[in-house]
Amino acid sequence: MVNHAPIGVFDSGVGGLTVLKALRAALPAENFLYLGDTARLPYGTKSPTTVNHYALSAANILVKQGIKLLVVACNTASSVSLDSLQQAFYPIPVVGVIVPGALAASRKVKHGPLVVLATESTVRWQAYSKVLSQCAPELSVIEWPCSFLVSLAEEGWCEGALVEAIIQQLLSPLLDPLFPKPQGILLGCTHFPVLKGAIEHVFGPLVTVIDPAPAVAKAVTEKLTELALLNLNLDFGQLQCWVTDGLERFTRVSQVFLGYPLQENVELVTLG
Amino acid sequence: MVNHAPIGVFDSGVGGLTVLKALRAALPAENFLYLGDTARLPYGTKSPTTVNHYALSAANILVKQGIKLLVVACNTASSVSLDSLQQAFYPIPVVGVIVPGALAASRKVKHGPLVVLATESTVRWQAYSKVLSQCAPELSVIEWPCSFLVSLAEEGWCEGALVEAIIQQLLSPLLDPLFPKPQGILLGCTHFPVLKGAIEHVFGPLVTVIDPAPAVAKAVTEKLTELALLNLNLDFGQLQCWVTDGLERFTRVSQVFLGYPLQENVELVTLG
């Protein structure tokens, strides 16, 4: 593995672009190869067996390109498949989003409850609860499925009265006065950071909303530093984007998640 | 092919249950085998090549079971893959939802505009426009993509003020006073019939909203009669439901689309 080799970033679709954005901000000299498995999205409503099968075959495409590190920028795949990916692609380091996100939340939220908003599959796997029971055993954690927010984000509906009304309806049990008021909300799906402002409005200023992406970027930086694999080039790194289906939709929707138009061409790759 | 052989009904997921419901009402003595390709849903945001590949492999599972007729209860697959399915499985008759739906709409809507609400893939394929240009060349047709309504329906959000506000926002260009007022709305996705009441509320009593499902059931009845393949048994027929992933979710969400709880066990089948 060489220092100028790209970092592979893998997601089921466009949501992982919120993680890519944080990675590029933290590591501007690095080259990135992003793969969105758009032919088989969403992962978040599918079974662990299916997610595992999809994650391994999609990540394999990146590994074949000689990446120096793999970021699993999808909460569902990180929950279900991190161990399998680490074993399958050893010695390539594989960083998921769950552990960095859980550690960041445990630093910011001391008493709880901490509500983890995530897809059905991530919640069923209890990935955040498992990590948090180790690093913050006192913290009360509630994992809450809300896959519908994925569609809302992909529609580009990120703010405004209607979006807040939808969030209020979807999360109404958490807003019930009889429910213990959350101290923090962890965005346990890479689609949700684009809804951060709206979620903050709905829950009010006393609730801390945490996007794991900066913590993931920090974990990747530390891992590359530890392995002496940082790209020491002074120029800006390159980005390549690959999808397994729907070029046009990916390019159009990407702006919602990156916050700026994608400058690079997106290429279609075929799954074996 | 024998008369008591099942009718195969194929969809990308749960939406096709609205068609199955109409089929069972029209043909109570028939046996049905329903397959939801939930491992690879949704089809509606994916490319024609991918949809074609998925539709052929999923329908093949039903054909292997000795079905006497195949209903493609998915607008996207009917748009993109009907010809391929008819060729691949000849002489088994294959009935899609587009032609019956378009014919039903052309009987009810004479002047237009007729708005077809559908997924991105169905709209891109212009399947309804193509059929309607043949059977009702005078009719002005507007195909309108609104895949987000799929998520709304799957969430079980079918009626009420918030649902109507979402529909209003999503279809706001069609509701603009400067836009020619639609005479009819065709529900060009099998998920949408559960939103029929809300869509009628939003557009008002002068707009006819058409669910193609009864017309599909009529087309199937006619085809079976023509081929002398009706099941002449006097008992109620059996239903078997198969999915390629996510048994629990399918069973839970099915009630929204059937309008009653699914009595039958759902079984998981593996794609080759």
Image: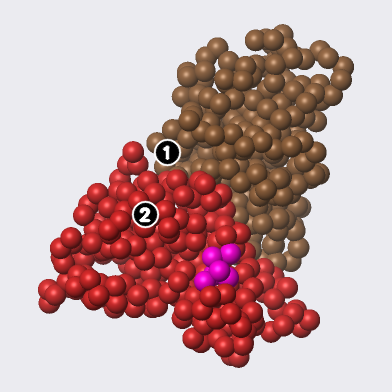
Chain colours: A brown, B red
In the picture, measured across the screen, residue A202 lies left or right of residue B49, that is right
* Residue A172 visible in image: no
Q: Are marks 1 and 2 on the same chain?
A: no
Q: Main secondary structure of the magenta part?
A: helix
Residue placed at 47% from the left, 69% from the top? B98
Residue A93: which quarter of the image? top right
The correct choice, above or below, for B73 with respect to A205 in the image is below
Residue flagged by tag 1: what amino acid is it?
Answer: Thr
- SS category of the residue bearing label 2: helix
The correct choice, above or below, for B25 with respect to B240 in the image is below
Residue placed at 62% from the left, 64% from the top? B145
Residue B175: give x, y in percent of width and height.
71, 79
Residue B110: give x, y in percent of width and height.
57, 88
Give the magenta part as a residue range: B126-131
The correct choice, above or below, for B262 with respect to B103 in the image is above
Residue placed at 52% from the left, 71% from the top? B131
In the picture, measured across the screen, residue A218 lies left or right of residue B200, that is right
Tell me the residue that label 2 is attached to.
B87
Residue A108: which quarter of the image? top right
Q: Nearer the viewer, mark 1 or mark 2?
A: 2
Tell me the residue that label 1 is attached to.
A50
- SS category of the residue bearing label 1: helix
